[in-house]
Image: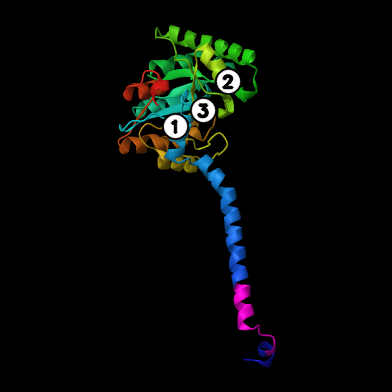
């Protein structure tokens, strides 16, 4: 050992104290990082126990359907768009159906698309009139938008001589309030959210979104994804065949409720 290192070497007690201090600092940093990351991870990939808590906490909101059958509901928001027809063909090719939550302002000029969705076994539901957070709307404005969109959906069902659409509503941005729930109950609508959401409205990486969905699939799950994005088609092109290979059936929300023998999903819990 050189004379310099010998003269400036810390006593063993001080060295141990410094080592413990470094370890304590690292542990604190890890705890801070975990406390920051964990909430985002729970939002991105909520565990089943959390979904079950949500269903118990808000029983009038549909998050999932308890069943042992390998069946899931696929829901697709923000249609119709230039991608809807291709999505419909993918569903048909894979023996799948979906519930499309329709934005009323996007229907004009695409009425035939809605009619074809119904003819192919899909169902249409209400996603309000515009692509905006529904929670920010007044009761009167939301009621007016729901009525206007539902009228357009009824027209599509009537055009193909089918029974009317279900009274399902998914709020823009997915957020709801107690006031909204009370208002919707008075209007005869039911809130539908879900349990499997790859956040594809914001994340444009279809491989990442496909992996997310496939890692979260479980019986009775409700998948949320979005129309009007170019990455949705390649995502579904991966997801649908793989779920079929795993033995899952992909159906509408109404079919999922029927599969579980639930006529009114408020009776799930």
Which mark identifies residue 38?
none
Residue 234 x %, y %? 46, 36
- CA separation, marks 1 and 3? 13 Å
Residue beneath disc 3 = 227
102 left or right, relative to 138: left
Residue beneath disc 2 = 180
What is the crowding at mark 1: few (fewer than 14 residues within 10 Å), some, or many (at least 20)?
many
Which residue shows up at 45% across the image and 30% down it? Answer: 56
Camera-nearest residue between 194 and 252: 194
Which mark identifies residue 223?
1
Do we see residue 59 in this rendering? yes
Q: Quadrant of the N terminus?
A: bottom right
Circles 3 and 2 in contact, beta carbons < 8 Å: no
State the extent of the magenta-drawn residues as a range: 7-19
Q: Nearer the viewer, mark 1 or mark 2?
A: 2
171 left or right, relative to 215: right
Q: Give the structural element (helix, strand or loop) at label 1.
A: strand
168 vs 250: above or below:
above
Q: Nearer the viewer, mark 3 or mark 2?
A: 2
Residue 219 x %, y %? 35, 34
Name the N-terminal-most of marks 1 and 2: 2
Q: Give the structural element (helix, strand or loop) at label 3.
A: loop
Name the N-terminal-most of marks 3 and 2: 2
């Amino acid at each position: 050992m050189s004379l310099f290192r010998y003269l400036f070497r810390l006593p063993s007690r001080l060295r141990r104290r410094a080592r413990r201090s470094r370890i304590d600092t690292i542990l604190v940093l890890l705890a801070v990082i975990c406390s920051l990351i964990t909430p985002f991870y729970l939002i991105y990939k909520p565990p089943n126990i959390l979904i079950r808590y949500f269903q118990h906490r808000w029983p009038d909101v549909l998050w999932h359907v308890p069943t042992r059958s390998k069946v899931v509901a696929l829901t697709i928001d923000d249609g119709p768009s230039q991608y809807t027809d291709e999505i419909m063909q993918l569903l048909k090719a894979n023996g799948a159906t979906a519930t499309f939550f329709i934005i009323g302002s996007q229907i004009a000029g695409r009425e035939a698309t809605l009619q074809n969705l119904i003819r192919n076994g899909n169902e249409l539901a209400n996603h309000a009139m515009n692509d905006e957070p529904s929670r920010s709307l007044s009761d009167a404005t939301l009621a007016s938008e729901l009525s206007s969109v539902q009228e357009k959906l009824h027209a599509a069902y009537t055009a193909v001589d089918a029974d009317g659409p279900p009274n399902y509503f998914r709020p823009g941005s997915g957020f709801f309030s107690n006031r909204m729930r009370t208002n919707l109950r008075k209007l005869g609508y039911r809130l539908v959210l879900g349990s499997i959401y790859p956040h594809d409205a914001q994340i444009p990486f279809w491989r990442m979104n496909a992996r997310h969905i496939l890692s979260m699939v479980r019986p009775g799950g409700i998948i949320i994804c979005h129309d009007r994005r170019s990455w949705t088609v390649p995502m579904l092109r991966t997801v649908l065949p793989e779920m079929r290979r795993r033995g899952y059936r992909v159906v509408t929300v109404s079919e999922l409720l029927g599969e579980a023998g639930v006529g009114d999903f408020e009776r799930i819990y």
